[in-house]
């Protein structure tokens, strides 16, 4: 059992568990296979392609951590493996959060007249914020995770991670409020289709898991996190979150694995139409296929739009008004 006693020269502060990384490597690999199979079956790579990608990256991250469990004392090679493992594990939660934003945007496309903001704006706004979070995360982890970095570099890295986590927390709260407002509007309009309710409930659970993980990481970096692997007394003074490995496996590894499994069980590809031009009439039952707008933008503009999540170089035609649905009655309001 863990006793919280640090080990001189350990890149992890402690001697890492040798069994847990194997379990999570296998579990994430199986989840990745499940996501890939679902994406192929439901033709939903565009909708949830980030889930298999993140599961694969998590698999690589924990496989490298298993290597580190046997090679945890400082050396140039062990340090490289350690930093890459940390980066792989750190960058995925914001990407999974981005995947959730994409799913919410597709739900808004499905019931556009209930959306609190234009459906195409969801991914562009939140995607740009997540790009900022990922940039801060990657740079912060690269600095903070390197025990041989100077104290000033570790402090800078820690501050970048804290900034990324703080932004992530605020964005999560805004996201949940938008989803809840949309959900309430649908309920008042008596729209209870599974294509809306099931993905929304899964989104709430997923964002709750990511929120708990963010709070854990924020608390971790608010404590004493300056690591000097050659100073035993300094290591003993570190935050307990850094000295006890179970915090990591409970609040990071397990939460993210459960999140991945959630989307394995309730894949949005099962519920939402493959084409975002298909949306729900106001009767709450009839699906309408809208007209697909031509995209005559230059290739560079299209690429720029993808790379900026649609924030720049937008296709103005694509986000025009949806067809009027006066031929379909509004959903009946039952007492």
Image (tube, grey):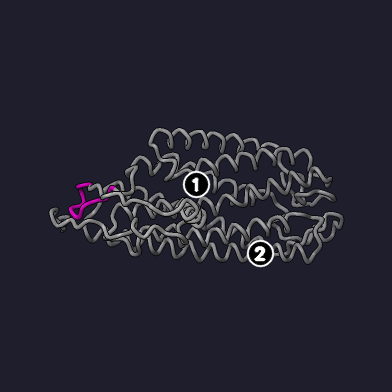
Residue under pointer 2: 160
Image point 54% across, 42% down: which residue? 53
Q: Residue beneath label 1, please?
A: 259
In terms of secondary structure, where does tag 2 sit? helix
Residue plotted at (70% across, 38% down) = 66
Q: In percent of the image, x 84 and y 49: which residue is there? A: 9
Please state which of residues 196 and 211 is positioned toward the viewer in this rendering.
Answer: 196
Q: Secondary structure at mark 1?
A: helix
Check if residue 93 falls in the magenta segment. Answer: no
**Residue 233, position as x, y percentages in the image:** 84, 60
Give the Cα distance between marks 1 and 2. 25 Å
Give the quarter of the image for residue 77: top right
Q: Residues within 10 Å of mark 1 (few under 14, many from 20)?
A: many
Horizontal and vertical percent for residue 166? 57, 66
Foreground of the two, 172 or 294 = 294
59, above or below 154, in the image: above
Where does the image place residue 62, in percent across and percent down from the top left? Answer: 65, 41
Q: Which residues are magenta?
A: 278-287
As drawn, is 216 to the left or to the right of 229? Answer: left
Tell me the residue at 46%/64% (across/down).
173
Query: Secondary structure of the magenta portion, mostly?
Result: loop
- Which one is earlier in the sequence, the residue at label 1 or at label 2? 2
Looking at the figure, which quarter contains the C terminus?
bottom left
Instruction: In the rendered view, tell whether residue 313 sits above or below residue 288.
Output: below
Q: Is residue 144 left or right of residue 181?
A: right
150 or 314, nearer to the observer:
314
Q: Is residue 177 left or right of residue 189?
A: right
């Amino acid at each position: 059992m863990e006793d919280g006693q640090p080990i001189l020269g350990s890149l992890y502060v402690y001697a890492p568990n040798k069994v847990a990384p194997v379990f999570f490597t296998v579990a994430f690999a199986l989840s990745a296979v499940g996501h890939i199979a679902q994406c192929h079956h439901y033709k939903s790579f565009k909708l949830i392609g980030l889930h298999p990608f993140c599961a694969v990256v998590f698999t690589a991250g924990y496989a490298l951590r298993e290597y580190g469990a046997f090679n945890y004392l400082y050396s140039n090679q062990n340090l490289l493996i350690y930093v890459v493992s940390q980066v792989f594990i750190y960058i995925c939660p914001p990407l999974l959060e981005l995947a959730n934003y994409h799913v919410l945007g597709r739900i808004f496309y499905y019931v556009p007249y209930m959306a609190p903001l234009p459906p195409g704006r969801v991914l562009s706004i939140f995607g740009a914020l997540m790009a900022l979070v990922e940039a801060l995360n990657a740079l912060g982890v690269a600095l903070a995770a390197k025990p041989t970095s100077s104290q000033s570099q570790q402090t800078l890295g820690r501050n970048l991670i804290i900034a990324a986590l703080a932004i992530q927390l605020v964005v999560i709260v805004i996201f949940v409020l938008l989803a809840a407002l949309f959900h309430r509007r649908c309920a008042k309009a008596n729209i209870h289709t599974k294509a809306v309710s099931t993905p929304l409930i899964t989104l709430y659970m997923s964002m709750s898991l990511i929120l708990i993980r963010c709070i854990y990481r924020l608390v971790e970096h608010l404590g004493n996190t300056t690591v000097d692997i050659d100073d035993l007394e300094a290591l003993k003074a570190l935050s307990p979150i850094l000295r006890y490995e179970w915090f990591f496996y409970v609040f990071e590894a397990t939460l993210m694995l459960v999140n991945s499994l959630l989307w394995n069980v309730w894949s949005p590809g099962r519920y939402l139409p493959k084409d975002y031009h298909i949306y729900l009439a106001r009767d709450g039952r009839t699906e309408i296929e809208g007209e697909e707008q031509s995209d005559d933008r230059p290739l560079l503009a299209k690429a720029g739009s993808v790379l900026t999540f649609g924030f720049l170089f937008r296709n103005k035609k694509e986000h025009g008004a949806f067809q009027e649905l006066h031929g379909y009655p509004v959903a009946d309001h039952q007492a």
